[in-house]
Amino acid sequence: MQALVALANEKKASLVGAFFLVCSLLASCVQAEPPAASCAVPAGGETVYSRSVTDGDTLRLADGRRLRLAGINTPEIGRDGKASEPWAQAARRELLALVDDEPLQLKVGAGPRDHYGRTLGYLFDSHGRSVEAQLLQAGLGYAIVIPPNDALAECYLAAEADARQSRRGLWQSDPVQSVGRLENGGFQLLRGRVVAVTQTRPALWIDLDGPLTLRLERRDQAHFTALPDSSWAGRELEVRGWVVDRGEQQNGFRRFMINLRHPAQIHPVSTH
């Protein structure tokens, strides 16, 4: 179990401990302060204003840039006849209230843009409080760590853990879905049991007991001090990330896949 959640250094250990509230399982754990006010404003920020809010994690700045908040994913607002996910409209309203008619501080992330061309960054209100952490602490989104934009991961994970423990927002009901019931792509919070771990030249693959496999590419394996191996078989995991629907696969390959970028995406539920 210790190998499952071991991280590269003491900071990473505290990050996962705040997220999963399982500090007793970690070799080293420093309890993170849950309030959103604990997120320090990074140096080198700029003053910006909001023009409009698209959804709970995306807004248009007054200078024309589209900003995607780093380190958080909120429920999707329905489009093209598709219904909104639960708490999507609440997340949008909360973001609008946090950024409307006031100067904001923006720190662009180390990875400055996503594949849609949106600016990725950390946003703070006029009082210096993290906008992302306030959304997470209200239970209106999920913390997600995607290197290299992990500067405030510890704070975000602690804010989410506080909401989860207090059953705020989307945590009022259990949003975790069984891997066996997986039918669609998109961001998911899932639970399943490991059935196989396979190392190939480009990546390490973790197959779960359902139509899902987890891919850990070599570029991201450095974030893990203890890589998955055959001893993981039988362990139950909670995993989060964007599910890729690869369509009907042949030769026993699983239809759905999540790319693992960081240890905070997985949480051990049981050893066997």
Image (spheres, rainbow, N blue to C red):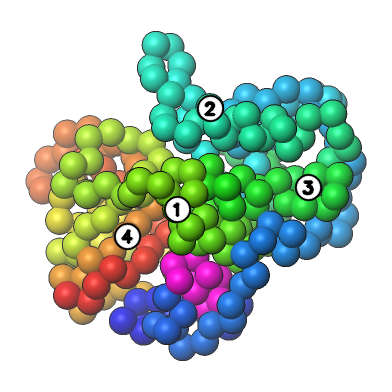
Q: What element carries label 2?
A: helix
Q: Is residue 15 shown in magenta?
A: yes
Q: In this view, does 92 lie above or below 17?
A: above
Viewer-closest of 34 and 267:
34
- Point out the frontmost of discs 1 and 3: 1
Magenta-colored segment: predominant secondary structure: helix
Question: Quick check: marks 2 and 4 in contact, CB under 8 Å?
Answer: no
Q: What stretch is highlighted in magenta?
A: 12-21
Find the distance from the CA under tag 2 to the CA under tag 3: 21 Å
Image coordinates for residue 130, horizontal then vertical, percent = 73, 51
Instruction: Tell me which numbered mark, 4 or 1, is placed earlier along the sequence.
Output: 1
Residue at image location 78% in from the left, 29% down from the top: 100
**Residue 30 percent location from the top left of the image:** 59, 81
Residue carrying label 3: 124
**Residue at 31% in and 81% down:** 1
* Farthest residue, direction left: 251
Give the CA separation, mark 2 to mark 1: 18 Å
- The amino acid type found where label 1 is placed reads Arg
Per the image, label 4 sits on a secondary structure element best described as strand
Pointer 2 or 3: first along the chain: 2
Identify the amino acid type marked 4: Glu
Q: Name the residue under label 4.
A: 238
Q: What residue type is labelled 2?
A: Gln
Q: Please give the label number shown on residue 167.
A: 1
